[in-house]
Image (cartoon, rainbow, N blue to C red):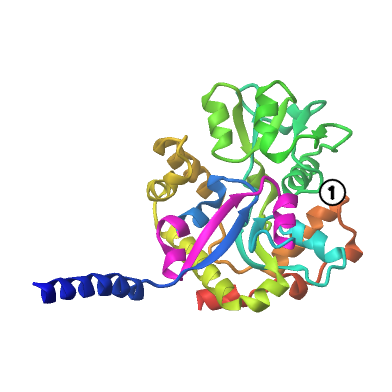
Amino acid sequence: MKKILVFLLAALMIVPALCACGKKEQTLVRLNEVTHSVFYAPQYVAMSQGFFEAEGLKVELTNGGGADKVMTAVVSGQSDIGLAGPEASIYVYNQGKEDHTQIIAQLTKRDGSFLVGRSDGEFSWEDLWGKTVIGGRKGGVPEMTLEYVLRRNGLTPGVDVTVDTSVQFNMMAGAFTGGQGDYVTLFEPTATQVEAAGQGYVLTSIGLESGEIPYTAYFANMSWLEKNADTAQRFVNAIAKAQKWVQEHTDRQVAEAICDQFPDTDLAELEAVTARHRQIDAWNATPVMERQALERLETVMEQAGELRHSDWVPFEELVNNTFAQNAIG
């Protein structure tokens, strides 16, 4: 009897050890996103479909609430990888910081925000004449792209239309529904939620008006990339798989894959929002960033008065496409 007990105890000790050996050790990646939006659907697909896990990564996601805050977290080492507009990396590079950030993957290729107004009906950009638009932080890609679109439609910001840059990014919807401004630019699902609540109407897509620009991309400090090149490669591999998955699946399937990220949004609404992003061709098909795309963004920044032409950043200094190119073979 004593021998049997000893055998059973030994077996019980061996089983957990075998289970532990069978598990692949995961590397933690602290990811900081500029906001939480359906606009970043491929990222949430990578999480829900196990693409990060398959690469041996455990992703800890934080909502930074603005590109400046995301960049601060990455530069300070509080986060490993940031997701925000490339303008943040341009600003850091031009500060002369030796350990500046490098872009390793592009996620979206258009502005993902929508213009929301207080009245429905046929929309014309002339309607904004003499009005106020809550446009986000001065110098951020959303605000600069809005100004670019206004100019393309014959409106001079600060003269023909007021762009309110005093409201924090994650407070814009609340400010608008609270009575501030005549129009606001909002991301999804917030824009649709405001409309569903009868507090505004989605009028047009800013991204459709602006054309393609590298709107959001992943970046990390050069020092982190040098020490964690394998982790960075596995991260971009997962993003590339998710981008391909989104291209190959229906709006309904994408909505089902990301619904856990948006518990306050019903599935039908998520499907409609996904379709809206697909219609404007918001998502990059691969994580590779093209030179002309970055130059188009720098043109937008220059026209907004946020970047002198002499301060344009050399593409090779700012963008490291090695990981993206490896990911797509």
Q: Name the residue under label 1.
A: 304
Residue lying at the far left in this picture: please name it.
1
151 falls in the magenta region: no
Quarter assignment of residue 220:
bottom right
Quarter assignment of residue 284:
bottom right
Instruction: Name the residue located 21 percent from the left edge and 74 percent from the top edge.
Output: 11
Q: Position of residue 153 (x, y in %)?
A: 76, 40
Does residue 312 appear anywhere in the picture?
no
Residue nearest the observer in this picture, 7 or 87? 7
Instruction: Name the residue located 52 percent from the left edge and 72 percent from the top edge.
Output: 234
Number of other residues with Cα within 10 Å of mark 1, as a class: few under 14, some 14 to 19, many 20 or more = many
Instruction: Name the residue located 88 percent from the left edge and 50 percent from the top edge.
Output: 305
62 falls in the magenta region: yes
Of the 4 image quadrants, the one containing the N terminus is bottom left
In the rendered image, the vertical position of residue 183 relative to residue 76, given as above or below: above
In the shown orientation, is residue 211 left or right of residue 27? right
Q: What element carries label 1?
A: loop
What span is colored magenta in the figure?
Answer: 46-75
Quarter assignment of residue 307:
bottom right
